[in-house]
Amino acid sequence: MALTPVRTINNLIKNTTPSLYHVAARANSWWSGVEMGPPDAILGVTEAFKRDTNPKKMNLGVGAYRDDSGKPFVLPSVRKAEELILSQKLDKEYLPISGNAEFCKKAIGLALGDDHPALTDGLNVTVQGISGTGALRIGSTFLSKFFPGPKTVWLPAPTWGNHVPIFKHVNMDVQQYRYYDPNTCGFNFTGALEDIRKIPENSLIMLHACAHNPTGVDPKDEHWDELSKVIKERKLLPFFDMAYQGFASGDVAKDAYAVRKFLADGHKICLSQSFSKNMGLYGERAGAFSIICNDKDEAARVLSQVKILIRPLYSNPPLHGSRIVATILNTPELHSIWLNDVKGMADRIIAMRSKLKANLEKEGSVRNWTHITEQIGMFCFTGMTPQQVEKLTKEHSVYLTKDGRISVAGIASTNVDYLAHAMHQVTK
Amino acid sequence: MASSRFCEVQQAPPIEVFAVSKAFTDSTNEKKVNLSVGAYRTDEGKPWVLPVVRKVEQELAADNTLNHEYLPILGLEAFSTAAAKMLLGATHPAITGGRVTAVQTLSGTGGLRVAAEFLGRVLKYNTAYHSAPTWGNHNLIFKQAGFTNIAPYRYWDGGKRGLNFDGMIEDLSNAPENSVIILHACAHNPTGVDPTQEQWKKIADVIEKRKLFPLFDSAYQGFASGDLDNDAWAVRYFAERGFEMMGTQSFSKNFGLYNERIGNLMVVVKDTACIVPMKSQLTLLVRGSYSNPPCHGARIVSRVLNDPALFEEWKGCIRTMSGRIIEMRKGLRERLEKLGTPGTWDHITAQIGMFSFTGLTAAQAKHIADKYHIFLLSSGRINMCGITTGNIDHVAEAINDAVCNITN
């Protein structure tokens, strides 16, 4: 986020757009120095999509799950949980600063396994956050104040765009380690290890637990094992962002492999969780931030400081989403239905990946499209260039971001052929 | 390197209002009373989910066209527009002139934080003033948002148990240009003391003369006097006078939606051309903090504010809540006067809203907690909502005992 001093803006406006300067000067307003912020790339894609009148248009920009009719999907387990909650006629009193206790317990239990020793020993600090973003922000705020190492976070290249401002807003620096290999559209294992080995000791490193956003490229289990070793050797603090547990492979334990392995190897991790995708609760903002501490006393001290940071952000978190999550995870019947629901979503995405790849081959494409089925989760880094992307949008009304990322959730059995055809046209 | 990265982390001081509430919860005394945390209670001492809220929730649940998709970063527009109209009045010249913009926030706290971040990071203001005393979180919010100079302006006059008007004007007169002045729109927290309309006019004069920036914290509109327009008088007056200003709104109390975190940040500008760039900067601040706000509470409030029949029903609920509080104020004052409790007690009925600064000292508050298991803050602040017809005698007795027997 670049904020230019007022003087510079006024000069810029004066020299390039006299009428605007005239307005700014005349207004004598508090706000006349406010520069227009950069437009959101993804929002821009959606706006352009909305304006397009082509009946075959496809929106592969935004990261929200769609069913096979291209519609938002409210999970059956969520509907049932909501009915249950409504019938209980509970009150609307403030949650504690740390949020819904049942939610926090079940959330971290889902990540680590309910009977994980770190939990039974009370080593975790787990607080409710405003979904994944909010959880990350609690984390970055806490780390910017209390992390004794360098105030820099090492992010994979590329990473979710919002990681950067979340750390920059709390005056931390951001650096990158190699992650995506554009040659293979896969994981740059050697590059990642090389770069991680060079990270200064005692630094902070961010890792996507599963279904990497934006590439869809995840390390294999063996890769994670090695990463864990090297990260331990460098004495780094791993901060996991887990926004897709269950949503990636359809199996909640499998998707938590990295998190659980790191804990087993003795790392004391930070973790942010989101229930936006795996429970379809996007707008209800259900998330959790956790730190695994050395002992109960440390956990108590850390929790007290985390609460002090949350209070001036928004006092205490919203209840509705967290209640739904807690109800589902706490009610065996609903829990089963949910595991089914999330597997259903993951399966549909995996099926669309298969179909897309198969159709591209059927179209006669000679390019290697294996990465489409190798990658996992909501997104796929297709490997298309910005020029090819532009063509895809202009000539075929397929909307995606310039980096060639598609949201597989936006593909349906009714349009996967169209997409394959269009992609072949622009890449052949 | 120590065995843990976090072994140097010190225990943070507990936040008083939550610590006191916990003490209440832990107490096993049958006659215990919680006069600390700021939430409405019925005459049975129970939380109250407004009937109109339950009704709307049923409607929302039955509506199969609704889903849980992300709201826009700046929230539900239908909600924000209606909320801004509720605060300024739909026909206010600032609104009809298109000079008002508003964004959904995480209740009042969230609105204040976004406002502070914008004022601090985008406009580069570094000085803020808050009343002495004020809601405990004001200072922390501005500090966390990067303000380097946060100072009090005199407000509470302990002697006359009212507003130290001259002190307030003097302090504002000495504030440097571009200082952000945090003003309570009505039902001042924690004192319950509001300026009169004449006093507000003079406050506006100083703020205008010194080129200060007014930021209204409106957490109790409707809840104070029972009348939405009455409670918004100060905000509307400032806007009408042509101030550029911000107002944060909370719907925690007046809708009883405490835990759904529903609030609004309203900005009044002179030049409509500023609105688009401003919103783009607010977007960046929100995105890096929590991406987008929760939808459940916004849907409920939007539905009520935008439906005439539901709106009337809701106004009835506010009258119920504010009415009960006014009854309890009368009752407490009567009993204290009847008991002959030393001092004057008309401030109990002169003050307005949820809270009353009783004038009790920290020692007296402790005595009341220890002996009577009646829990209030060490500042002497009580939540009138915690008083019921069932416990009002007990509370009066406790106050009387403390004032008579605990000095210093």
Image (tube, grey):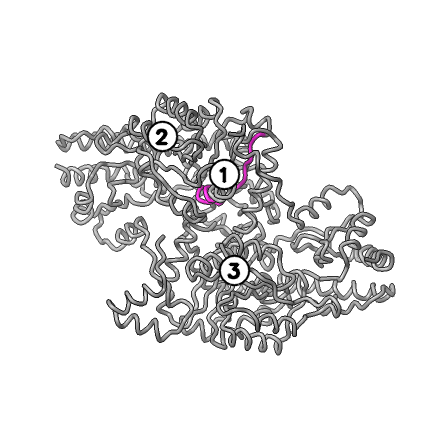
Q: Secondary structure at mark 3?
A: helix
Please state which of the two labelled residues, at mark 1 or mark 3, is closer to the viewer.
1
The reply to whether residue B233 is in sight is no
Q: Are marks 2 and 1 in contact (CB under 8 Å)?
A: no
Q: Position of residue A411 (x, y in %)?
A: 28, 39
Q: Return the residue at label 1.
A: A147
Q: Secondary structure at mark 2?
A: helix
Q: Amino acid at mark 2?
A: Ile
Q: Return the residue at label 2.
A: A196
Q: Position of residue A53 (x, y in %)?
A: 22, 54
* Subunit of label 1: A
Q: Secondary structure at mark 1?
A: loop
Instruction: Please check the rendered image and state whether residue A132 is part of the magenta-colored stretch, yes or no.
Output: yes
Q: Is residue B220 above or below residue B210?
A: above
Nearer to me, A331 or B349: B349
| Magenta residue span | A123-137
What numbered label is drawn on residue B304?
3
